């Protein structure tokens, strides 16, 4: 494919397409400046809703959004009606978030027919996510035929893990024929936050070891050594690892067979329960961590247990990640819960004294945006670092195009 001249100052239209939603942002790769953001929800239903935000003002539209093609029509209409004008703030590329790249994609790639065909073959690895990602790519290629389109994979950052970290102790045929292994997710977030943490420490990225705790409705930890992922909590799917909003994290693999024997639970029922009814929702009946914290403050026993289980898993994975790294320079909390729950951060770090972390309680309680929450004497630093996955996607897209 011939290379196109790339203006490094041109914004990138970042697309995150799900099965029933489309998130987008027009962002400059060189500075991270966001020119507009948007979310189109309830695709395929007659009560669709779009929110387009520019210059701090939300513009809300409610109408039927039949499919992803209609969603992209609405996206372009939002820019035309509310700005910025895509003819004046012309994107240099479209960057697509793709959840699962399997073992095939170890880095960002420019999208062509062969890449699309490979993505379709990878759907069984992420049946809940990749079909929506692919639908967004297909329509974007039709909507913006003259723009280079780039796929940035959640799994790619973790392709640097050594074999000992990504290999499951399962039969050889599963590993060789079915590609059963640990892949990891939230890669764009882990990449951005680990790099930004090194900058906050004033250290070269290649000489900085960080454990990133990405804590949102989905949650994962990552041990980052010199800017490279060397271990992570999520596995073949986004179910493994930490407790999440509706996903359980680590489980005994004998559970499905046991439930089948004692209750007749089918595999589809088990899969639904693990993806939609477990985690915080399974523990306390609510997947919203803010509600869990409020109920805990009011003395609710189920919410208290849920909070304690979350902390236990975080401490377990933080400790194991530190041992994998051998030397730990910093811990970074990010994503919705990591950035906003001072109580959770304190509960985790108060149990991390063995790692050399000394919590600054006042800094933690008042943290807003990028904040050091460990004392100046702490042997290992701790930070709150808001993630910026859209900027990371834009940055990787433009870097690829600049060198292709």
Image: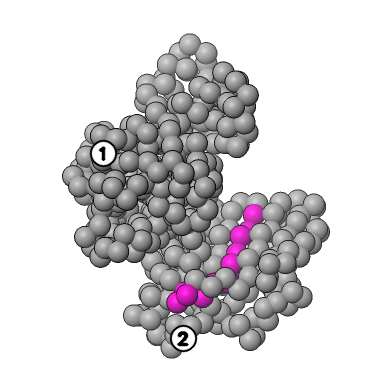
- The quadrant the C terminus occupies is bottom left
- The quadrant the N terminus occupies is bottom left
Does residue 192 appear in this view? yes
Does residue 156 appear in this view? no
Q: Is residue 61 magenta?
A: no
Query: Residue most toward the bottom?
Result: 5
Tell me residue 194's x, y (percent). 35, 57
* Label 2 vs label 1, nearer the camera: 1
Q: Which residue is located at x 56 percent, y 79 percent?
A: 91
Viewer-side residue, 119 vs 361: 361
Rendered image quadrant of residue 282: top right
- Predominant secondary structure, magenta span: strand
Q: What residue is disc 2 on?
A: 7
Tell me residue 263's x, y (percent). 52, 13
Mark closer to the chain start, 2 or 1: 2
Q: Residues within 10 Å of mark 1 (few under 14, many from 20)?
A: some
- Which range is magenta? 21-31
For mark 1, give the secondary structure: helix
Tell me residue 104's x, y (percent). 33, 58
Residue 355, disc: 1
Question: Can you say whether 105 is above or below 334 in the image?
Answer: below
In the displayed structure image, the side of residue 333 where residue 103 appears, left or right: left
């Amino acid at each position: 494919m011939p290379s196109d001249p790339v203006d490094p100052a041109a914004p990138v239209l970042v697309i995150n397409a799900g099965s029933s939603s489309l998130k987008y942002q027009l962002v400059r790769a060189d500075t991270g400046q966001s020119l507009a953001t948007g979310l189109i929800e309830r695709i395929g239903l007659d009560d669709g809703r779009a929110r387009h935000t520019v210059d701090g003002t939300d513009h809300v539209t409610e109408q039927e959004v039949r499919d992803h093609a209609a969603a992209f029509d609405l996206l372009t209409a939002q820019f035309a009606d509310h700005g910025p004008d895509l003819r004046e703030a012309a994107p240099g590329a479209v960057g697509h978030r793709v959840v699962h790249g399997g073992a095939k994609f170890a880095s960002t790639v420019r999208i062509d027919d062969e890449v699309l065909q490979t993505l379709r073959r990878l759907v069984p690895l992420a049946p809940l996510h990749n079909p929506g990602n692919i639908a967004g790519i297909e329509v974007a290629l039709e909507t913006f035929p003259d723009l280079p389109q780039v796929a940035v994979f959640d799994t790619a950052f973790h392709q640097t893990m050594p074999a000992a970290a990504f290999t499951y102790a399962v039969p050889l045929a599963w590993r060789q024929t079915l590609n059963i292994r640990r892949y990891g997710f939230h890669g764009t977030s882990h990449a951005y936050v680990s790099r930004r943490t090194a900058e906050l420490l004033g250290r070269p990225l290649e000489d900085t070891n960080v454990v990133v705790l990405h804590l949102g409705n989905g949650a994962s930890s990552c041990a980052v050594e010199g800017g490279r992922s060397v271990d992570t909590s999520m596995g073949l799917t986004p179910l493994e690892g930490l407790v999440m909003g509706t996903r359980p994290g680590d489980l005994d693999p004998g559970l499905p067979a046991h439930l089948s024997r004692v209750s007749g639970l089918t595999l589809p029922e088990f899969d639904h329960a693990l993806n939609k009814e477990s985690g915080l929702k399974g523990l306390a009946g609510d997947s919203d961590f803010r509600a869990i914290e409020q109920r805990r403050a009011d003395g609710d026993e189920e919410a208290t247990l849920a909070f304690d289980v979350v902390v236990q898993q975080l401490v377990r994975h933080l400790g194991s990640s530190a041992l994998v790294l051998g030397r730990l320079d910093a811990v970074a909390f990010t994503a919705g819960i990591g950035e906003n729950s001072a109580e959770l951060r304190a509960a985790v770090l108060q149990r991390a004294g063995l790692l050399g972390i000394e919590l600054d309680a006042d800094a933690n309680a008042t943290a807003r945006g990028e904040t050091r929450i460990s004392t100046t004497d702490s042997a290992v630093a701790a930070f709150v670092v808001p993630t910026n996955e859209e900027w990371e996607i834009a940055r990787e897209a433009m870097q690829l195009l600049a060198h292709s």
